[in-house]
Image (cartoon, grey):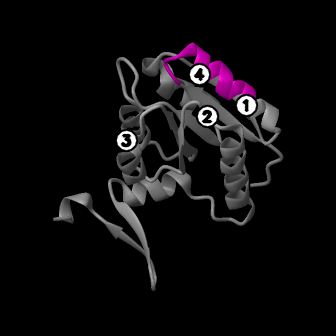
Amino acid sequence: MNYKTLKAVVIDDESDSVQLLEKLTDDSKLARVIGSTNDSKNALNLILELKPDIIFLDIKMPEKSGFDILDELIGIKSINPFIVFTTAFDEFAVRAFEYAAFDYLLKPVDPQRLTATLLRCLDNIKTGTNQPTDVMLKTYRKLQFRNTSGIAFIDPAEIV
């Protein structure tokens, strides 16, 4: 895959948050928002239709949470996006990384932090380490820890 800019989708129930993230993303010149929705019930259809490279996903939304949307996405192998959670709540960070999220941005999103995330994403694609959803499928609900021999995957249920 050779990208000049990433195709992004924004899913957030707050219109102001969607507009801000669209502007920051487009201003970065590293990604282009190709679609967004405030309705979590329509999120999966939007993702399937647009097949984005990266999804900016809020966690707390009416109807479905960001985690509910990912649960639906996990079984679909034709979609392989990077997942970046964008939320005002830091207490969901551990759970987000159980889903092998690529990143976790707190609102209001810092433009420099967003740029760093997009650059890492592009670097992963360029170096061939682009396995966002594939990794999520293999490590679903597992914590990742670096150790001396590489990375260890641990089921949170095994932690005492």
Quadrant assignment for the C terminus: bottom left
Q: Mark 4 — residue?
A: 17
Residue found 66% across the figure and 28% down from its top:
21
Give yes or no for contact between labels 1 and 2 (Cβ–Cβ under 8 Å): yes
Residue found 74% across the figure and 55% down from its top:
1
What is the CA distance from the residue labelled 4 to the residue labelled 2? 9 Å
* Residue 111: image location, x then y, percent: 71, 38
* Residue 8: image location, x then y, percent: 67, 35
Residue found 49% across the figure and 47% down from its top:
77
Q: Mark 3 — residue?
A: 92
Task: Please state which amino acid type lies under the numbered disc 2.
Answer: Val
* Residue 68: image location, x then y, percent: 35, 33
Residue 138 as seen in the image, left or right of residue 18: left
Q: Is residue 101 above or below residue 12?
A: below
Q: Mark 2 — residue?
A: 109
* Res 79 visible: no
The numbered mark, 2 or 3, whose residue comes first in the sequence reads: 3
* Res 85 visible: yes
Which residues make up the magenta segment?
Answer: 12-23
Mark 1 lies on a secondary structure that is helix
As for residue 63 lying within the magenta part, the answer is no
